[in-house]
Image (cartoon, grey):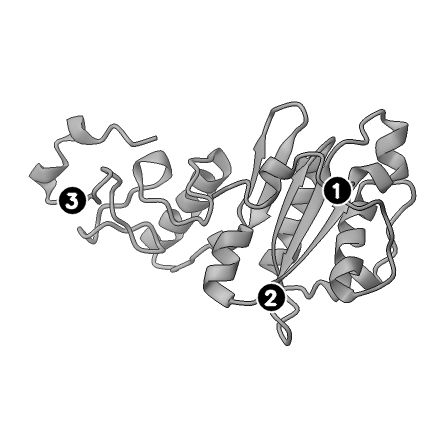
């Protein structure tokens, strides 16, 4: 997916674009021309998912507006949530496993299957999983989440806040989750990272193994 900026005659204004045609901006959405800003799909992707999203455009617009008013503001794009409205639903927030591993090295990953969750069974939707991505030993920050299954969007939204606030995954381990709820899947993944005793059948979490390793690239 590439932007259709070729017809905008950006060269006449001296505005720089990258090799794909995206307008180059800084974190305040300012182009190389100081009084010109670019937000939304036309601008270069500043997110780890490289996906054009409405809520990202809204956040970028806020950054630009504050900058124009002389009150510089930047948005951390490492926590951006996304949803793919398939059946089952796919959702995520923050860094993918591949990006996190390239950035931080020996990260830790916990996966928990919907098949071990009572709420998923009650909703006749026991197929899916939650994957929690945290930093390497000594860095307990939540870096990302990937989920496939019913209401995966709600899990991604909750994790997005945790990532933005740089909360440790132990925050999830120590929290009291309502039962039955799908949030227990997120907590289960955190318990697995912590090394706490959780048992399920070998391979049970991999109903969608072909998507498990890295949904967003």
Q: Quadrant of the N terminus?
A: top left
Q: Residue at x 87, y 35 (%)?
A: 119
For residue 172, which quarter of the picture? bottom right
Is tag 3's residue or tag 1's residue first in the polypeptide sequence? Answer: 3
For residue 23, which quarter of the picture? top left
Depth check, mark 2 against mark 1: the one in front is: 1
Label 2: which secondary element: loop
**Residue assigned mark 2:** 135
**Residue assigned mark 1:** 205
Relative to the observer, which residue lies in front, 28 or 188?
188
Q: Is residue 163 visible?
A: yes
Label 3: which secondary element: loop
Whether pointer 2 and pointer 1 mark residues with C-beta atoms closer than 8 Å, the reply is no
For residue 214, which quarter of the picture? top right
Is residue 78 shown left or right of residue 140? Answer: left
Depth check, mark 3 against mark 1: the one in front is: 1
Whether pointer 2 and pointer 3 mark residues with C-beta atoms closer than 8 Å, the reply is no
Relative to the observer, which residue lies in front, 211 or 13?
211
Q: Residue at x 81, y 61 (%)?
A: 173
Instruction: From the top left corner, tell me how far across and down residue 85 is, in percent.
Output: 60, 25
**Residue assigned mark 3:** 15
Label 1: which secondary element: loop
Q: Residue 82 has which mark?
A: none
């Amino acid at each position: 997916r590439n932007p259709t900026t070729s017809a905008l005659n950006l060269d006449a204004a001296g505005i720089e674009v990258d090799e794909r045609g995206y307008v180059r901006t800084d974190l305040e959405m300012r182009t190389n021309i100081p009084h010109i800003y670019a937000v939304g799909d036309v601008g270069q992707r500043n997110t780890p998912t490289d996906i054009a999203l409405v809520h990202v455009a809204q956040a970028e617009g806020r950054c630009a507006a504050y900058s124009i008013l002389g009150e510089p503001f930047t948005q951390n794009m490492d926590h951006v949530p996304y949803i793919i409205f398939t059946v089952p639903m796919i959702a995520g927030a923050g860094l993918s496993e591949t990006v996190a591993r390239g950035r931080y090295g020996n990260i830790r990953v916990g996966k928990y299957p919907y098949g071990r969750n009572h709420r998923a069974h009650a909703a006749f939707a026991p197929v899916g999983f939650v994957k929690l991505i945290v930093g390497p030993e000594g860095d307990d920050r939540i870096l990302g989440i990937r989920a496939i299954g019913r209401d995966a969007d709600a899990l991604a939204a909750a994790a997005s806040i945790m990532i933005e606030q740089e909360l440790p995954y132990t925050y999830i381990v120590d929290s009291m989750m309502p039962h039955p709820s799908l949030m227990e899947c997120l907590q289960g993944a955190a318990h697995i990272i912590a090394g706490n005793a959780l048992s399920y059948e070998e391979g049970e979490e991999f109903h969608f193994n072909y998507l498990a390793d890295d949904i967003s690239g």
